[in-house]
Amino acid sequence: MLELVKLLNDAGRAYYQESREIMSNREYDKLYDELDELEKELGITFANSPTVNVGYEVLSELPKERHESPMLSLDKTKEIDELKRFLGEQKALMSWKLDGLTIVLTYREGQLFKAVTRGNGEVGEVITNNARVFKNIPLKIAYQGELILRGEAVISYREFERINSEIEDADAKYKNPRNLCSGSVRQLNNEITAKRNVRFYAFSLVQAEGVDFRNSRCCQMNWLMEQGFEVVEFHEVTAQTVEAEVIKFSEKIPQNDFPSDGLVLIYDDIAYGQSLGRTSKFPRDSYAFKWADEVRKTTLMEIEWSPSRTGLINPVAIFEPVELEGTTVSRASVHNISIMEELELGIGDKIEVYKANMIIPQIAQNLTRSGVKDIPKQCPVCQGDTEIKQVANAKALYCTNPECQAKHVKSFALLVSRDALNVEGLSEATLEKFISKGYIREFADIFHLDRYQEEIQSLEGFGEKSYRNLTANAEKARTTTLPRVIYALGIANIGLANAKVICKEFQYDVEAMLHATEEELNEIPGVGGVIAKAFVDYFSSRQHVKQFLDLLNELVLPKETVEETKQIFAGINFVITGSVTHFSNRGEVKELIESLGGKVTGSVTSKTNYLINNDVTSASSKNKKANELGIPIISEESFLEMVREG
Ligand SMILES: NC(=O)c1ccc[n+]([C@@H]2O[C@H](COP(=O)([O-])OP(=O)(O)OC[C@H]3O[C@@H](n4cnc5c(N)ncnc54)[C@H](O)[C@@H]3O)[C@@H](O)[C@H]2O)c1
Ligand SMILES: [Zn+2]
């Protein structure tokens, strides 16, 4: 028992004080239950046992404050029958047990007055300034009395992935959104909190004097919503409906972007709940339901090494597919080499897997432990040399090649950004995935995602529809302008405006630009020595020139030879109707026509020269009019043909 108390307390200290995990929650809960049983069996409980203490004393530099009423933990079960017994004849609210950091908010005279973390349940940390930058809490509310409410600060899985992907040190990465949230909320400087997109979901009202809640928790929650709070999703249940409701909740988990580690029941009848009092650790009016994690045995088939922008190469375990919580799972991140070594993970091992919080696949244990072998010497993306680095508590694999594409996600992100090629739907996260899998190596590859259609469609979170949208957006992006392309290359200090000036000076002649000297560039008004040097340096790399020319090969640049030099549409009037496919919208077509000296008007008249309509044969009023007046109706394709031929 003493050993268990020590082990659990060490884990608890790391977890509560340092937002760190030295064991998984699953492991923690297992040891906790073991201790709990021993205590019951022997009738002995040590004073420092985690079964009678909530949380841990907080040691941060944040100011501390004692809670008016203690913030307790929750009694937990994995059995539905236990929930039924708890419910008896009562009605209760069932809600998500959110897995973040519990916060108490106090409002006075309609203003946020303070925010305090749960801390060890008795004393918490004052984080009022940080709470002010949560994404969704009202700073002012209509109610003027003193309001005290509790809720959970959480960070979504999506944000968690975004933030983690930017951390280089394998040991400094956050293990899960809870851990990240705890670190983000307990900051001395709220600028960091603000960047982490923390959300707050209220789950209980402690006090609001003078408001009649008709003795109902449900009524309280609705009132909180009226005051402008986002409250945790909740539903009313009874012993008769609880089972079905648990199933309904569990079915929503795959779509949930916020982390939750179970469900919570609280009696709707406030007075009844309060009359029951509390144990040393738990209130008696609430009960938490923990998912009985499904565990499956399977075989490790391969370790996939997945390079990231920080150079870190993440090991992912690929195993024979198993059904877990209703979906087929075949991969689990192993984070770093130290964890692989702890698990003695070798190909062919029999392993047990489960989904943490019903979402994130994880290896629970390795039953055969054949040992770590075959750590790649070459980076799978760039073939550069790899290196094992020991950082703080973890050993991890890194790619040493500074030119590794995986390290240049940002340059691909610039390439597809709005002012550059403007490929909608290619987020940084998606780019990172595609690059690490080798679907994108060079700039031009964003136009050839069709080579990996099958693989992309089977990626998690990707389906046929998103694949189609993505490739359609890439097709649209093919029609662009030379300055945008130059800007897209990400040459230091060259923004879109500089790129325009340079293109114009060289009359959109790519060859001339590639051979431009620093002196020539320096003479262009608005282009200084720094830009001139950056431009020449960039194109002095043969690899850069090749990548640029390959990219140009994919593109249609209507303006390249003509802008302001050849006004091919001077005196020509266009009308555009219907939707366009090579441009984001009709506005862009108009811009192009005008840059070539033409005009675009809204309706077809005798002065119109061309009607652009992809639906050439439709019986629309514009088509009719054009036919009456003998005005040619042309498709976008033929229009682009005119542009290209000048
Ligand atoms: N991995 C580790 O090393 C380690 C160490 C210590 C604790 N833990 C984890 O922490 C758990 C114990 O943590 P605990 O006692 O701090 O919290 P808990 O798991 O008992 O959760 C109770 C708290 O959840 C919050 N909560 C979230 N949503 C809620 C809702 N809808 N309604 C009401 N309350 C809601 C409340 O603040 C409540 O006090 C363990 O089961 C274990 O999983 C892990
Ligand atoms: Zn590499």
Image (cartoon, grey):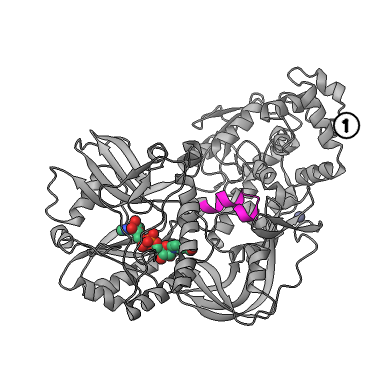
Relative side of 375 to 165, left or right: right
Residue 90: give x, y in percent of width and height.
Answer: 16, 68
60 vs 248: above or below? above
Instruction: Please tell me whether residue 162 belongs to the stretch shown in magenta.
Output: yes
Magenta residue span: 160-172
* Tag 1: amino acid: His
In depth, the one of 52 and 433 nearer the eye is 52
In depth, the one of 386 and 528 nearer the eye is 386
| Residue under numbered circle 1 | 515
Residue 142: give x, y in percent of width and height.
Answer: 22, 36
Residue under the point 16% across and 56% down = 216
Instruction: Please tell me whether residue 32 belongs to the stretch shown in magenta.
Output: no
Residue under the point 45% across and 57% down = 257
Marks counted in the figure total: 1
Ligand 2 shows up in which quadrant of the image? Answer: bottom right
> In the picture, which quadrant includes the N terminus?
bottom left
Name the main secondary structure of what is drawn in magenta. helix
